[in-house]
Image (cartoon, rainbow, N blue to C red):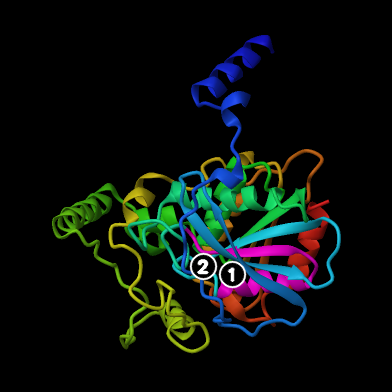
Amino acid sequence: MKRITILTAAFLCLFGLTESMAQDNQSSRNMEQLNLTQEWDKTFPKSEKVNHSKVTFVNRYGITLAADMYVPKNATGKLAAIAVCGPFGAVKEQSSGLYAQQMAERGFLTIAFDPSFTGESGGTPRYMTSPDINTEDFSAAVDYLVNRSDVDSEKVGIIGICGWGGLAINAAASDPRIKATVASTMYDMSRVSANGYFDTDDSAEARNALRKTLAAQRTEDYRTGTPKLGGGVPDVLPEDAPKFIRDYFDYYKTPRGYHKRSLNSNGGRNATSPIPWINFPLMSRAGEIENAVIIIHGEKAHSFYFGSDAYKKLTVVPGKENNKLFMVIPGASHTDLYDQLDIIPFSHIQKFFNENLK
């Protein structure tokens, strides 16, 4: 035990985490000045049951993140809190904001945030993604929440939607302050980047061909000084488009879910974004998560295999036999869980958080 204590102390000193160096006054942080829209510009109606405001906070890499905060009206005392993000390539005015508002109606203080490099959040180059930085974005949201005077710091959870579901599980594995995690209609972005959809390109040959393409693109980006965008959901659907692409079109390209700042609704992410995802598998430590996790997936979702396989990585902790759950929504597609209020199991999500944020 003594040897472990010494080694731990040495590790913390190596990374500058001794008490004297860890002092960090939040008010002294140099936040980037963001241009935050003040009018209601969401893809869903504003609730009369909650108070809405804009907030900002800084992640560990110094990037200022923008969020919409939803607080139940007439709330008193310290509240349980939830941070929400996703889908991957979306903004907080879309699905994550809907989830956040719905959970605020159910008594939680919630924030829906734009990831680094995206939407109203800071960071350059724009429209970049990173398995490390995006996982950090969730923990930065937790930093903000646990330091609020109206939040019970021991009652903080997160919700990740689509690709942010996998990132939510990744964050839960690294940050024990996250007491409960919901991964809704999740993607494993590292797996789909490295293997293609349904693992059809799961070979060294296919990955090396992709790496060459991405390397050539980054050479070109450096030459021009302007990163190329990879493209969002197509403006015109090809006749042979698979159903899940048609479902994405129906959400991102129609009044149902279109937003002017959404990557998927417009030009997409930086074309070289897949580079780190190919080489850094997500959820490699998911089996070490002690706190509660629920994965929610539609039975008919093309992404179902991501959630099913992620659930297999989770480990039941002695004494907490019911805190790792996999919930299947009969007949639901991937995008049904973006915004369909009659399909998304908000009452069950509320029950899950009530049971695990206490």
Which numbered disc covers residue 22?
A: none
Image point 58% across, 48% down: which residue?
139
Q: How many numbered dots are placed on residues in this image?
A: 2
* Dot 1 amino acid type: Ser
Q: In which quarter of the image is residue 210?
A: bottom left
Say whether residue 236 is visible: yes
Say whether residue 327 is magenta: no
* Dot 2 amino acid type: Pro
In the displayed structure, 61 sits above or below 1; it is below
- Tell me if label 2 and label 1 are in contact, CB under 8 Å: yes
Q: Mark 1 points at which residue?
A: 96
Residue 79: x %, y % from top left: 80, 58
**In front: mark 2 or mark 1?**
1
Q: Which of 329 and 85 is in front in this view?
A: 85
- Looking at the rendered structure, the secondary structure element under dot 1 is helix
In the displayed structure, 147 sits above or below 103; it is above
Residue 274: x %, y % from top left: 33, 56
* Mark found first going from the N terminus, 2 or 1: 2
Q: Which of 124 and 302 is in front in this view?
A: 124
In the displayed structure, 51 sits above or below 209; it is below
Q: Which of 287 and 270 is in front in this view?
A: 270
Q: Give the range drawn in magenta.
A: 94-115
Left or right of 105? Residue 138 is: left
- Position of the N terminus, as image quadrant, is top right
Left or right of 201? Residue 55 is: right
- Looking at the rendered structure, the secondary structure element under dot 2 is loop
How far apart are the alpha carbons under marks 2 and 1? Answer: 7 Å
Residue 348: x %, y % from top left: 76, 68
Which numbered disc covers residue 87?
A: 2
